[in-house]
Image (cartoon, grey):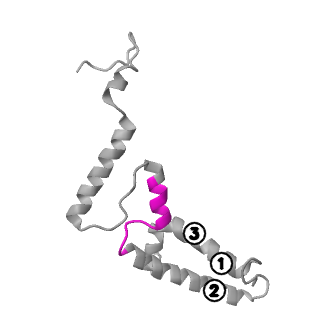
Amino acid sequence: MAWLGRPTRRMAFTNYLAQSVILGWIFYGYGLGLFNRLEAASALAIGLVVYAGQVVFSAWWLRRYRYGPVEWLWRTLMYGVSQPMLLLPRGQAASALIRTAKIVSSFRDGPKDQTRNLEIPGSRFQRAPE
């Protein structure tokens, strides 16, 4: 049964937001307004159907893409570089990962000449001469 939730883990943020919108629309007044009108078994059945639909959709999506749409947006905004979305064959995937890591490390490290200006003369934490 562990396989049942595996696709939804890689798209957790997308599924969380989608589930909130779908179930909100079903149960609250801005949608069908079924809150307090259904018995517990009916509400549970609706929740399980929505979850099963998310598992199927997540598995379909992740066969084509690396991340869920919200996870992709989150990573792109976080790193400041558009993240690759499509799945690539194995050899191309490794080179794309290396390119992304180099770009991210260049943002984190900054230009090399600026780090020299941060050294304080007389400090015991000076860099070794190059």
* 67 falls in the magenta region: yes
Q: Which residues are magenta?
A: 63-76
Picture disc at residue 23: 1
Which residue sits at x=77%, y=78%? 29
- Could you tell me how far apart the alpha carbons at marks 1 and 3 are, in whole angstroms? 11 Å
Q: Nearer the viewer, residue 29 or 40?
A: 29
User: What type is the residue that disc 2 sits on?
Assistant: Ile
The residue positioned farthest toward the left in the image shown: 91
Residue at the (49%, 57%) spot, across then down? 74
Point 75% across, 88% down: residue: 38
Q: Residue at x 68, y 78 (%)?
A: 25
The residue indicated by pointer 3 is 16
Q: Report if the CB atoms under discs 1 and 3 are less than 8 Å apart.
A: no
The residue indicated by pointer 2 is 46
CB atoms of marks 1 and 2 within 8 Å:
yes
Q: Relative to 64, is 50 above or below?
A: below
Q: Which sits earlier in the primary sequence, circle 1 or circle 3?
A: 3
Q: Amino acid at mark 3?
A: Tyr
Position of 44 with respect to 76 (left or right) is right
Q: Quadrant of residue 88?
A: bottom left
| Few, some or many residues within 10 Å of mark 3 (<14, 14–19, 20+) | few
Label 2 Cα crowd, 10 Å radius (few <14 / some 14-19 / many 20+):
some
Q: Earlier in the sequence, mark 2 or mark 3?
A: 3
Q: Amino acid at mark 1?
A: Leu
Q: Secondary structure at mark 2?
A: helix
Report the residue that reaches farthest toward the top: 122
Give how far across and how far down residue 84 sits, in percent. 35, 60
Q: Which quadrant of the structure image shows residue 21? A: bottom right
Residue 123 is covered by the magenta coloring: no
- Quadrant containing the C terminus in the rendered view: top left
